[in-house]
Amino acid sequence: MTAERLLSTTMTAQHERRCLSLWSLREDVLVDTGCANGSVVLSGRWGEIRMHQARPVVREALRRMSLGPISLANVMAEMAAESAVRPSPGGRTADRPAADASTEILRVLHRLQHLVVRSLMLEGADQLLLSVVPIAQSARYQPDTADRHRPVRLSRFAFLRSEGEGFVLESPVSLYRVVLHGPEASWVIGMLGRPVTIDEIAAAVPLPDAVIAEIVAHLVGSGMVHSAEQPSPGADDRTRPGARDNGTDNRDRAPSFAEDRDPALLSWSAVDLLFHSRSTLGRHDADFGATYPLADRLPPAPAVKPLPDGPRLSLARPSLNEVTAADPPLTTAVEQRQSIRSYGPERLTATALGEFLYRALRVRGLYEPQGENRHQEGYTDRPYPSGGRAYELEFYLTVRDCVGIPSGIHYYAPLEHCLVQLGDGETDSAAADLLAEAQITAGLIDPPAVVVTITSRIHRLSWKYSGLPYALTLKHVGAVVQNLYLIGTAMGLASCALGSGDVELAARATGTDWLTEPSVGGFALGAPSRASTQSS
């Protein structure tokens, strides 16, 4: 940053309008310039920074930056003019020469990079073009001068979404968020889905070349856009996709981007990396944790889902004393756990299924909220762990062959320990589809006796948590699946987790809305054959 100019002004050939580079602080930064000894204190989401004996021009610049985007050159000019008419005691000027002040301001802003917002604006316009906002404490802006003849391209990890009255450009690989205030920057971004040069953008977008170059330079500096690598001498990529016809017998080499060959990035899809970065801390500035984001807008979901309509079938409750006496040791169950994909001639029974569900999924206790605290909600106690005692997971059983249980789709009521049959023409037809899907997904030799579809009442989590709900529900699925495996192993059942599932099919089969109660996991169950030893 120390090599930058305070005011980047590019004279354009069209309308002679300048492109102004403006500076501000993040909106959550508070600046206190009234401290003793000329100190300035900046307070924000990442703590407090105290700058001792800050010069007047620095204090004034930071004060103005806390109010919105400013031209630092204007601050310096005004401070210099004020110093000229108001000399300090002893006849000396109140501040050092402008060049020295410029260096000092840039040095300070370099230290505050994680708090500094960089913006562009067309001279005379009533709104900014774009703003580059740091979203992590480790954010370091990399200024770049765009080469008009060098191809550039939007990162494959970048995504554009609406926020408020405009657009924001974000990427899990970048520690910045680019806010697009006007349509002009969006025009440029719309051209960057493939490698293009500034000249090519200028031929399609009604903006001056210099303005386009400034927009591209800020996008490159934020990591949202990448410049093509310089071709290696003697390299011949004429046959690669994307090569350009230059009007001769040869074709220009296709642009090459480091992002496309980075082994660390090749392992990630854009969606997966975004999910990972936003469901953990360190690379974003969004609210996170138990912030109760919906407490003022919606009531919490009940701790136990109300029973759906349908015939109820009570399940056997095992004696836990007898279970404890008969079960193998935990270490034995862990070591013998297998994904069993074939079944024997014996049939699964209602008694065995009841014991399995009771030991793995039942509600052991229900606690209703007490008092008038709006952040209080009811909770349950169950045999598996759940963050914040949310216990948002629900379980639906598609039964093909179980003695004492009618075939079809059933909801497991964990508090009542019973099954509720969900019977209509559509769910009946979906049962066969769910069984076939489970067989294909898990590579089962035969259709399973029972398929457990796991859904999530996601509002139980999103009412309380920011940033965590979906990641947390998947963690809960993992805990439940291990519970099902170990109890199935202890009972001598053939157990196998399902690696994926059709959310639309699950919603149709269970009669749920995939937005309010999406399917998030599955499990196949049956009676094992003696030769069932295939493990995973």
Image: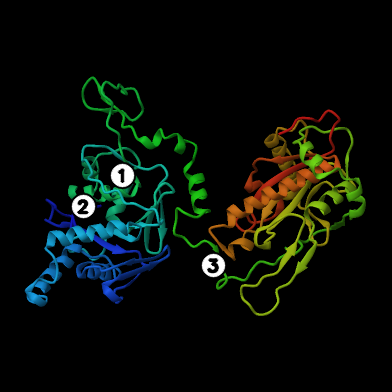
Amino acid bearing label 3? Pro
Mark 3, Cα crowd under 10 Å, few <14 / some 14-19 / many 20+, is some
Question: Where the C terminus falls, by quadrant?
Answer: top right
The residue beneath circle 1 is: 191
Residue for point 31% across, 37% down: 195
**Is residue 131 visible to us here?**
no
Amino acid bearing label 1? Met
Q: CA distance from mark 3 to mark 2?
A: 41 Å
Residue for point 32% across, 48% down: 189
State if disc 2 and disc 1 touch (CB < 8 Å). no
Q: Secondary structure at mark 1?
A: loop
Mark 1, Cα crowd under 10 Å, few <14 / some 14-19 / many 20+, is many
State if disc 3 and disc 1 touch (CB < 8 Å). no
Please, is residue 116 above or below residue 454 in the view? below
Across and down, in percent, residue 470 comes to 59, 54
Q: CA distance from mark 1 to mark 2?
A: 27 Å
- 497 and 386: which is toward the camera: 386
- 117 and 300: which is toward the camera: 117
Q: Secondary structure at mark 3?
A: loop
Amino acid bearing label 2? Glu
The residue beneath circle 2 is: 4
Please, is residue 480 above or below residue 47 in the view? above
Across and down, in percent, residue 501 comes to 65, 43
Please, is residue 315 above or below residue 145 in the view? below
Between label 1 and label 2, give the one nearer the viewer: 2
Q: CA distance from mark 1 to mark 3?
A: 36 Å
The residue beneath circle 3 is: 293
Instruction: First in sequence, mark 1 or 3: give its number.
Output: 1
Across and down, in percent, residue 36 comes to 29, 76
